[in-house]
Image: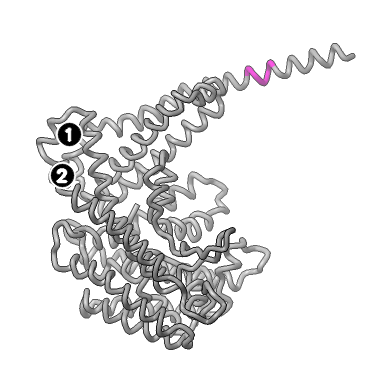
Amino acid sequence: MEGQGEGASSSSLLGVLDSPAYLYLLTIFACYPLTYISRTYLHGQSPSVKHAYFIFWGLLLMFANFGYDVIHSAISILVNYALLVTMGGTQLMVALSFIFNMGYLLTAYALFSTDGYDLIWTTPHCILIFKMIGTAFDLYDGKRKEEKLSQEQKELRLKSPPSFLEFSSYAYFLGGCFSPPVFPLRTYLDFTAGKLTDNDQGLPPNSIKPAFQKLGVSCVFIVLYTSLSPIFSNAYIMSSEFASLSFPFQVLVVMGWGKCVLFKYSVIFLLAEGVCIMSGLAYNGRDENGNALWDGCVNFRPLVFELATNGRDLVQSHNITINTWLSRYIYKRLKFLNNRLVSQSASLFFLAVWHGLYIGYYMGFAQEFLVFFIEAKVVDINKRYPPLARIAEIPPVKICLLVVFKVWNVFTFSYALIPFVLLRWRRTRIVYSAMHYAPLWFYVVFILVFQFAIDPALKKMERSKREAASMSQESETAKTK
């Protein structure tokens, strides 16, 4: 799921064009020619020249959108840099970075949020704090013993604080300033040092074609959104007409509405990813056939997303870099708890807090957790009860199950998006009550039935099998004697 900043950035995309949203969208488009210039004319220049270029244009575009509120990003950069330099590599530095960045953002939400999405300076700031906190963790890893680090941590660690120029350039880089993708400082420094290149001739990267391909895909989603959003609007799902529909038709409408919501997020993600490709930052080596890969900053995989039949594939193919950051710096860091459920819950709670203070965010992520839990239990039942697994492999049954899972996948995610988008309970309640809270009741009933009926029955069956196997083994042993 996506953050308040991302939702705001695309909340009026081409459909209801208010001035801030229009300017924000134009800003991201403007990053294409600006990164083309850096790719073409700054290639081979010193990193300092590139840093100065990105700081200048990042600040200018931020000022064009938010005026003197750009001071908030400057304050954040100064405070975080002071922490890196004065307390570099300590656990206290990481804790203070976490507290300061989240505290600053939540204070801003409390002071400046209105009754809906707010396209103000908090939009890019919620992306900035991922960079700040992630850098603190990477510097901390640089001071730890190598044998205690994972391979990923070894690759991303910083053995010394960056310079202020490097740090500021990282914060204002055009490809990750206004929207994800989010990428580590180590990757960015390799990029500005000219280490991420697809040729050995000292030429600019061949990134123009893949960048425009990404831009073309984003245009497809723009067409889809502008075509369907008038039909599947927030106003419609809160209308008496929607309430009068039968439940199956309500499900179809919610699915269509959810797809429209995700279309507009997808546009922003694809555009920003294309900017990273154009700059050359997204270069990710070559495939087995020697073709250059430009997926180093991939944030959305449309084909995987549209074909997903479970919640995990859906989440892992949309807003990928935020989910990667969450896994890298929150979920995996809680490994010492030795409890995946707790780590996952803490990660989702952090993500909900990061989005803002509206209750809708917490309701949305709570449902995401429930859907993940239910899907895991269905897989568990299938593994533990072989007859069911054999039936599921029969071709006609398998096809029917794929259709059912796809409908489940789109509907449950869309249903969870309702509070996430409407934000307030008074608005969410209108839609949920129109559907008689049926999905929520299903979640609760399934969990109770699994806990008190299905799981005990499976345990009893497994115990009987073990006892039968034990008796058979004892019988064979007796015969042998």
Q: Nearer the viewer, mark 1 or mark 2?
A: 2
Nearer to me, 389 or 464: 389
Q: Position of residue 381 (x, y in %)?
A: 51, 28
Give the main secondary structure of the magenta stretch: helix
CA distance for labels 1 and 2: 18 Å
293 vs 317, left or right, is right
Give the structural element (helix, strand or loop) at label 2: loop
Residue that carries the numbered disc 1 in the rendered image: 434
**Which residue lies most toward the left here?**
240
Residue that carries the numbered disc 2 in the rendered image: 231
Nearer to me, 412 or 84: 412
16 vs 85, left or right, is left
The span shown in magenta is: 464-468
Residue 89, quarter of picture: bottom right
- Do the residues under discs 1 and 2 have CB atoms within 8 angstroms? no
Amino acid type at mark 2: Ile
Residue 152, quarter of picture: bottom right
Residue drawn at the location 19% of the way across and 70% of the way down: 23
Residue 139 vs 46, above or below: the answer is above
Residue 19, quarter of picture: bottom left
Q: Position of residue 68 (x, y in %)?
A: 22, 80
Residue drawn at the location 50% of the way across and 63% of the way down: 293
Give the structural element (helix, strand or loop) at label 1: helix
Residue drawn at the location 27% of the way across and 76% of the way down: 62
Residue 232 appears in view? yes
Residue 455 vs 346, above or below: the answer is above
Q: Is residue 199 magenta?
A: no
> How many numbered marks are there?
2
